[in-house]
Image (cartoon, grey):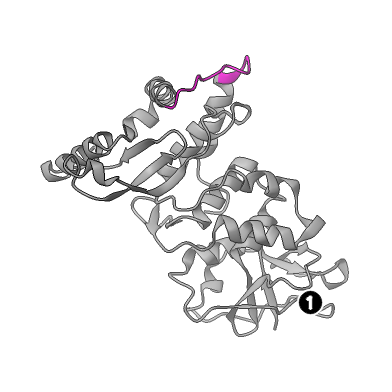
C-alpha cells in the first residue's frame, strides 16, 4: 500500500501532530502506477483510523484514480525538484503544510484560506477537543516557506493561493488574534477596515532613553503596525481574571505608551459588538494618522459577511 494524503485529510492530520519529531520531508512522489488502496484495517493507534471518509488523496492522472468510495482523488501535476510530502507512516505520505495551503485554494473561500495560513504560520492549532477550540503549538510553516513553495510550483498554483498569502502573517497566538488582525487589516473589498494587516506578536524594543519609564527593554505586541508605531493588545481574560493579571495588563499598556508606542486595549466584548468594534477601528486609524474610507455602498454588508466567515468553524474541523 502506498498512500499520498492531501487536502482536508492532510490538514486534519497536521493539526493532530504535537511536533514533527520522527516525520521527515521526502522527495517521494506518487508513481504513475500507484492506485490508492486501503488495507483491511488500521491499527487503533493510527491517526488515519479516525479520519472522515472518503480520504483525500493525491494522484498524478486520471489513470491512477482509485475507484473505491473510500477515496476522493485529487489530480496534481507536481514540481520536479520541490519536496511536497512528509513521510508519515510506513507507505503513507502526507502533503506538507505548504502543499496543503495550495491544494485547499482550489475549494475554499479566500478568507478561509487566509485563516488557514495564519494557523499554519502561527503558534496555535485548531482543536475541537479543547474547551477553548485551539491549543498552543509550534508553527507548522511560515509565510516565507509558503511563498517559496508557490514559486516552485510555477504555473500550477491557483491564483487564490497567490492572493491569500499576501495577507498571511507569522506569529499569531490564537484564532481571535487572527480574526482581529483581519477585521482591521483586510481591504474594504473583503469587508475589512483597510488599515493593513499588522505584524503578529512582534518584538518591540524599548529605547534606552525610556529606561526610567518602563519595566522591560522589549515587549511582544499582539498586533503591531511598525510604520505607524501603533499596537493593539488583546485581553482574552476579561471574564475570568484575577487582580494580579489585571494589574499586569494595565502596566504593560502603560509602559508601551510611556515608551512612545501608541497602544489600544481590546477585549472579546469589543470584538463581538459591531458598534464597539467600529469605534476601536476608528481609534486605531486616528493613532495611525489614517482615515477609514467608505469605498463601497454595501460596506456594512461586507463587514458582516467577513465577521461571519472569520468566526465560523472552518470546513476542516
Q: Which residue is mark 1?
A: 35
The correct choice, above or below, for 116 with respect to 90 in the image is: above
Number of callouts in the render?
1
Q: Please check the rendered image and state whether residue 178 is part of the magenta-colored stretch, yes or no.
A: no
Percent x, y for residue 266? Answer: 33, 33
Q: Residue furthest front?
A: 209
Q: Is residue 85 visible?
A: yes
The correct choice, above or below, for 211 with respect to 69 in the image is: above
Percent x, y for residue 151? Answer: 72, 59
Q: Residue furthest top?
A: 297
Task: State the residue in front, 205 or 2.
Answer: 205
Q: Residue furthest left?
A: 243
The correct choice, above or below, for 239 with respect to 172 in the image is: above
For label 1, the SS is loop
Task: State the residue in front, 44 or 13.
Answer: 13
Q: Residue at x 70, y 45 (%)?
A: 160
Percent x, y for residue 42? Answer: 56, 80
Task: State the residue in front, 311 or 260.
Answer: 260
Q: Main secondary structure of the magenta part?
A: loop
Percent x, y for residue 23? Answer: 53, 78
Q: Residue at x 75, y 73 (%)?
A: 81
Q: Residue at x 70, y 58 (%)?
A: 150
**Span shown in magenta:** 288-299
Amino acid at each position: 500500500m502506498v498512500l499520498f494524503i492531501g487536502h482536508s485529510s492532510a490538514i486534519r492530520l497536521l493539526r493532530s501532530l504535537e511536533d514533527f519529531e520522527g516525520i521527515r520531508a521526502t522527495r517521494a512522489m506518487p508513481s504513475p502506477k500507484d492506485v490508492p488502496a486501503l488495507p483491511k484495517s488500521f491499527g487503533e493507534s493510527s491517526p488515519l483510523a479516525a479520519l472522515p471518509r472518503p480520504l483525500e488523496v493525491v494522484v498524478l492522472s486520471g489513470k491512477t484514480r482509485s475507484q473505491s468510495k473510500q477515496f476522493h482523488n485529487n489530480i496534481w501535476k507536481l514540481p520536479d525538484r520541490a519536496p511536497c510530502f512528509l513521510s508519515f507512516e510506513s507507505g503513507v505520505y502526507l502533503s506538507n503544510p505548504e502543499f496543503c495551503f495550495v491544494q485547499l485554494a482550489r475549494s475554499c473561500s479566500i478568507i478561509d484560506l487566509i485563516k488557514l495560513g495564519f494557523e499554519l504560520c502561527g503558534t496555535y492549532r485548531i482543536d475541537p477537543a479543547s474547551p477553548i477550540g485551539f491549543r498552543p503549538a509550534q508553527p507548522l510553516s511560515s509565510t516565507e516557506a509558503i511563498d517559496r513553495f508557490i514559486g516552485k510550483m510555477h504555473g500550477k498554483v491557483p491564483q487564490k493561493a497567490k492572493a491569500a498569502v499576501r495577507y498571511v502573517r507569522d506569529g499569531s497566538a490564537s484564532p481571535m488574534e487572527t480574526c482581529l488582525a483581519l477585521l482591521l487589516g483586510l481591504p474594504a473589498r473583503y469587508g475589512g477596515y483597510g488599515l493593513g494587516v499588522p505584524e503578529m506578536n512582534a518584538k518591540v524594543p524599548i529605547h534606552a532613553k525610556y529606561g526610567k519609564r518602563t519595566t522591560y527593554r522589549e515587549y511582544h505586541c499582539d498586533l503591531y503596525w511598525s510604520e505607524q508605531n501603533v499596537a493593539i493588545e488583546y485581553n482574552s481574560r476579561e471574564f475570568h481574571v484575577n487582580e494580579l493579571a489585571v494589574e499586569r495588563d494595565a502596566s504593560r499598556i502603560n509602559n508601551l505608551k510611556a515608551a512612545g508606542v501608541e497602544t489600544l486595549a481590546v477585549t472579546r466584548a469589543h470584538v463581538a459588538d459591531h458598534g464597539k468594534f467600529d469605534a476601536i477601528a476608528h481609534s486605531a486609524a486616528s493613532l495611525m494618522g489614517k482615515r477609514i474610507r467608505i469605498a463601497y455602498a454595501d460596506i456594512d454588508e461586507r463587514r458582516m459577511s467577513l465577521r461571519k466567515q472569520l468566526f465560523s468553524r472552518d470546513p476542516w474541523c
